[in-house]
Amino acid sequence: MNITALAEALDTAARDGRPLAGGGSGPKDTGEAYAVQEALVARRLARGERLTGFKLGFTSVAKMRQMGVSDLIHGRLTDRMEIPDGGRFDISRLIHPRVEPEVAFLLGDTLRPGGDLMAAVAAVAPALEVIDSRYDGFRFSLPEVIADNTSAAGYAVGPWSAPGDLGNLGVLLELDGRPAETGSTAAILGHPLRALAAAARLAGALEADTVILAGAATAAVPLSPGTHVRATVAGLGTVRFTTE
Ligand code: OOG
């Protein structure tokens, strides 16, 4: 399958809520996979979506273990994926959504590879990311998940606050008021700022106003309709939404 055809197939799978069969016709390496991702995101932009952010995946051992993949990956976020904090998120068109707690950065200035991280960060917030692999059974190779825009499907960001020390903050993910996962921001590459540095390196440069999701601090948890989802990052606060 060529790059355009694979981007189209992944885009259609996402829009129809029907998974692609994995294996065989996927991208052959990560270079080709990022070309597919770019073509896939270009299709969204052509439909009027706007780029809002950049996300990292597999920044924690918990996620690498859960998915059997061990390399840092990155994807793009658009306005269409935004979930208002405290709002509702319709998952009826998703395939097999999962949710994970994260930390978000908001850039106040352009961040270049090797640039001063804290000078570029305007604010930080607790975040929730919804992932939904377009591959059957959430099973994929590294090039496949990259091509699939790293399973990005939705994200919610809690209240922004001035950046403080993010090195080892407790993370709690609750579903319907019951703890589902607990962890620490230290699980994110040892420190979420390392994820930010990696994002700058991988993106080339990131513009002011970009939201950066540093990657999940815990394993991801399956979502079903009518669920109250809440993530708390100690010192940063809480972010929540309800599925329907
Ligand atoms: C890929 C996305 C991983 C993270 O935070 O590790 C990710 C997947 O697990 O399907 O976003």
Image: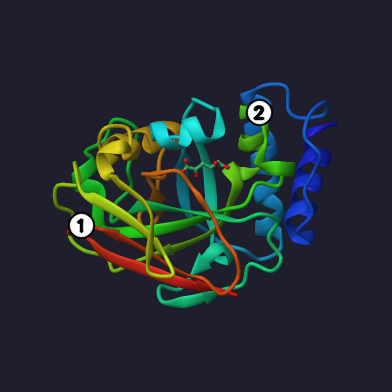
Can residue 209 be seen by looking at this rendering?
Answer: no
User: In terms of sequence position, does the residue under pointer 2 or pointer 1 come before the other?
Assistant: 2
48 above or below 145?
below
Q: Of the numbered discs in the image, which one, if any, rests on residue 141? A: 2
Residues at discs 2 and 1 in contact (Cβ within 8 Å): no
Q: Quadrant of the C terminus?
A: bottom right
What amino acid type should be assigned to the residue bearing mark 1?
Ala
- Picture quadrant where residue 24 is located: top right
Q: Residues within 10 Å of mark 2 (few under 14, many from 20)?
A: some
67 above or below 129?
above
**Percent from the top left, x then y, of residue 174?**
38, 62
Residue at position x 85%, y 31% from top?
1
- Picture quadrant where residue 226 is located: bottom right
Q: Of the numbered discs in the image, which one, if any, rests on residue 135? A: none
Residue at position x 66%, y 42% from top?
138
User: Which colour assignment does the render follow?
Assistant: rainbow
73 above or below 160?
above
In this orientation, which residue lies closer to the viewer: 155 or 8? Answer: 155
In this orientation, which residue lies closer to the viewer: 44 or 159? Answer: 159
**Percent from the top left, x then y, of residue 129?**
47, 55
Asked if residue 39 lies left or right of residue 153, the reply is: right
Q: Which secondary structure lies at badge 2?
A: loop
Asked if residue 157 lies left or right of residue 1, the reply is: left
Residue at position x 62%, y 52% from top?
132
- Picture quadrant where residue 235 is located: bottom left
Q: Of the numbered discs in the image, which one, if any, rests on residue 234? A: 1
Q: Under 8 Å from ligand 1: the CB of mark 2? A: no
What amino acid type should be assigned to the residue bearing mark 2?
Ser
**Percent from the top left, x then y, of residue 224?**
60, 65
